[in-house]
Amino acid sequence: MRRPLLERYQEYLPLTEQTPPITLGEGGTPLVRSERLWRELGTSEVYFKLEGCNPTGSFKDRGMVVAIAKALEAGSRFIACASTGNTSASAAAYGAHCGLTTLVLVPKGSVAAGKMAQAIAYGAHVLAVNGNFDRALQLVRELCSRHPATLVNSVNPFRLEGQKTAAFEVIDDLGDAPDYLCIPVGNAGNITAYWRGFRTYHEAGKAKRLPRMLGFQAEGSAPIVFGHPVKDPKTIASAIRIGSPASWKGAVAARDESGGRIDAVSDEEILEAYKLLARQEGVFCEPASATSVAGLLKLAREGMDFRGKRIVCVITGSGLKDPDLAQQIADVPLQEVSADLESVEEAVSSLWGR
Ligand SMILES: *Cc1c(COP(=O)(O)O)cnc(C)c1O
């Protein structure tokens, strides 16, 4: 059995004797080497950190396991969050696992089907707020300040502590930090957490170098790139549809201290990377996750030289979260055939010569 995250990285996490060692099997996700993309870029190596392999299908579980363990330690019985979907799925799962009451506020109509299904199946109390994510977060923050509920959004400091373990795993797998880490940026907690993780391991002597952090936002919701909040953020990538990131300062520090960049990509570029990952690499992710690869391709096209570099792209969540999108972008309609061999042979006759 894979060692639970809280046990494996115990010495780097804010745990005490009283922290319950809960786990749903989070962390220890695969680092898969690219078979095709690296050729296009002329790099030596590109890897995908497959965070969709976490128990609820996104990296949110790394931070949630720590936040929930600390909430239990503090005697909390009630957790709450605002969410574009994955935080609520994760909170609901750990809440159920630990017998807590879970309340989630989601922006009405803008959460992918798979994520809603999870929150409901795990038995969370789900409220669809008539407003965007930023408003839902404001509301839940106020709610938690007035009532005995623990806020488990990434403004909860334990979330980022847990999320930094992904950087540890990258170093543990590669033997050192990569040259570049490409990552989507929404509320900006994850880029902040990765940078903290890389620095922590570097200081502990577990890595000889530090990566440059390349963060990517969607053009229609790129407050950090523009330098001001976006009032009505828009993008197909709902997990990063955030106009006023909570960890803004952390993201800017990660960028500047690492000599990296935070850039924006269009929805078209995100969809191109989403298809490329699925069709040429066998990696099915949600659109927000494809942002890291879209950004890498964009910088390469603009002439940034990645030759001889080792690059890790964080693939933050599973494609199963958003099944509607995969069907919308199919190139050919689903073909129906009669249930006889002749019809099937006829339908596929053009494939044999390929
Ligand atoms: C939460 C999330 C992000 C954005 O991470 P932040 O920490 O908010 O920047 C990106 N992709 C997926 C799949 C997510 O769930």
Image (cartoon, rainbow, N blue to C red):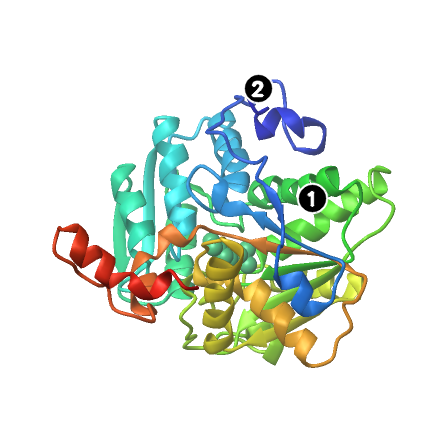
Residue 240 visible, this orientation: no
State the SS at label 2. Answer: loop
Residue 210 visible, this orientation: yes
Camera-nearest residue between 328 and 205 = 328
- Place of residue 351 in the rendered image (x, y in percent of width and height, measured from the top left): 36, 62
What's under tag 2, amino acid-wise? Gln
What's under tag 1, amino acid-wise? Val
Question: Vertically, is 77 above or below 45?
Answer: above
State the SS at label 1. Answer: helix
Which residue sits furthest top?
Answer: 17
Left or right: 272 as drawn, with respect to 177:
left
Left or right: 11 as drawn, with respect to 234:
right
Camera-nearest residue between 8 and 74 = 8
Q: Quadrant of the C terminus?
A: bottom left
Task: Look at discs 1 and 2 and give the one toward the viewer.
Answer: 1
Q: Earlier in the sequence, mark 1 or mark 2?
A: 2
Residue located at (33% from left, 39% from top): 102
* Label 1 neighbour load within 10 Å: few <14, some 14-19, many 20+: many
Label 1 with label 2: CB-CB less than 8 Å? no
Residue located at (24% from left, 62% from top): 347
Which label belongs to residue 18? 2
| Residue located beneath label 1 in the image | 170
- Place of residue 25 in the rendered image (x, y in percent of width and height, measured from the top left): 49, 29
